[in-house]
Amino acid sequence: MTVAPQIKKIADLPSPKGHFILGHLPQFNANNKHQVLERWVEECGDLFQINFVGKKFVVSADAELNDEIMRLRPTQFKRFYKITEILEEMGILGVFNAEGETWARHRRPASEALNLKKVRSFYPIIADKMQNLLNKWGETAKENKAIDVQKEFMKFTVDITTEIAFGYKLDTINNKADDFQEHLEHIFPMVNERITAPLPTWRFIKKKKDKKLDRALNAIETLIYRFIDEAKQRLKDQPELVENPSNFLEALLVEQEKESSFSDKEIYSNVFSMLLAGEDTTSNSISWSLYFLAQHPEMVEKVREEANLVYGSNAVPEKDQDLTQLKYANAIAQETMRLKPVTPNLYFQANEELTIQNFLIPKDTVMMLQNKVAQTREENFSNANEFIPERWMRGGCPMHENHSPEVIKAFGGGPRYCPGKNLAMHEMTIAISTLCKAFNFELAVKKEEVEEQFSFTMYPKNLLVKLTSV
Ligand code: HEM
């Protein structure tokens, strides 16, 4: 006789020690929330509950359960309502925060507009910004000054993303002031602040920064609407652009022509979603790569050798196809995202009651997925806490037996995995390769002084690096 497996309920799950009224809110109200959650995984296991003033949340570091939850979107699970709500309140309902049918309508054109073929056609923009950064860092190296890496890469990805998004040329790398950039600089931290705020105080009292946010959003909206009109006109005047759109906005307009027609508001929302989803994530990931490279001169040397072989005397690869040969630079990027995924956790909410792996998840339960945990477990990767890019090379080191790439969720999973992955990998690979070709790096602070900070994405605080030209 087979015994039916026992169904586990939330009430059966363990819980870390918390305050008798506030629950786990005080510990969670920090800039390193993800590390607090990781500590609790060590204390309570892969599945446990926490509460914020009585409201329950389930935390899962179980790779199989997490995989299933991501796969069951958009029907059985949606993004945590707070992310959706906060962006919607700012007038944005695009592919990142839409749900159900609306999401499906947005997703196809967004994925098409960022597919590998399109990303390849954007290569000249990426190469141009890379050259700008190399020139600037060349000057800094002469001055023997330390570089605030995270700020520098933010400028790099801002310049790339705005030009790829709608053809707008910024030059923040060289500190050229621009109204558009100033507005964005106010909007992004405010999105982060509101998503992680315990209470939506701005709905009751608008402080100076909230009013400034309203003004910034209005200004950006007006500008993007102008870009939409201009792009529509260009597509009419130059029909060849339909085959080869020169930026994301044009690609989106072409794709959306094929679908049911989209309103300008929806197009605006999607372009804005790209800016939001594509900037901090990519720049913080490149920053973490430099954190490791600055501690491993032998790897810098190896990346340089590969670069010299592939694009010789050029500072930047001439053509996009060269990037496919930069296998070691790519392995550095992959290993960085294994150890330092900038989205170490993802939050989802159940649309209906369901049972997965004998665990009963009631409707509306918020599941906090700790995806980073499995990426740094010995059972999945040998010498799991060591930075070993070779594990991503074909025929890599045979000493590293355990290798489970399927647990890597740095770009999410299931139908809503990141559509910007190709673009992000292009940006990371070119940055790692060309910078190692041109410079040697050295941490200008002690390794322990570089901290993981979480503000919507996880970034290296205090990462200062000194450069010397090769
Ligand atoms: C290293 C850089 C990046 C990382 C680590 C990253 C990571 C992620 C993650 C974890 C998600 C959530 C996936 C899920 O829910 O399963 C996501 C979604 C998304 N990302 Fe990225 N991303 C990066 C770069 C980009 C870029 C460059 C773009 C576009 C310019 C982009 C556009 C998006 C969009 C539109 C979504 C929402 C997809 C949906 O909900 O259907 N991302 N990304």
Image (spheres, rainbow, N blue to C red):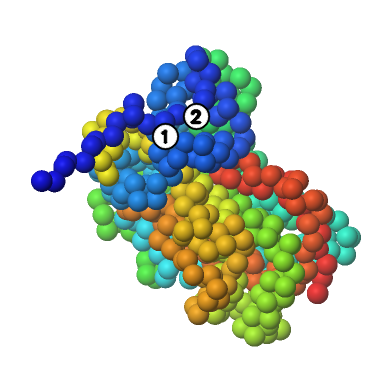
Query: Which residue is at 57% across, 62% downward?
Result: 383
Left or right? Give the position of 234 relative to 328. Answer: left
For residue 436, which quarter of the picture? bottom right
The answer to whether mark 1 and mark 2 are in CB contact below 8 A is: yes
Q: Which mark is residue 48?
A: 1
Query: Which residue is at 41% across, 34% downward?
Result: 48
- What is the x, y in percent for residue 68? 31, 49
Q: Amino acid at mark 2?
A: Pro
Left or right? Give the position of 461 relative to 234. Answer: right
For residue 358, which quarter of the picture? top left
- What is the x, y in percent for residue 159? 62, 55
Query: Which residue is at 61% across, 83% downward?
Result: 310
- What is the x, y in percent for residue 216? 58, 34
Q: Amino acid at mark 1?
A: Phe
* Residue under label 2: 16
Kindly tell me whether residue 359 is visible in this rendering. yes
Q: How many numbered discs?
A: 2
Q: Residue furthest front?
A: 1
Q: If you read the primary sequence from the N terminus, does the residue marked by circle 1 or circle 2 appear first?
A: 2
Query: Which residue is at 43% across, 68% downward?
Result: 116
- Name the element at disc 2: loop
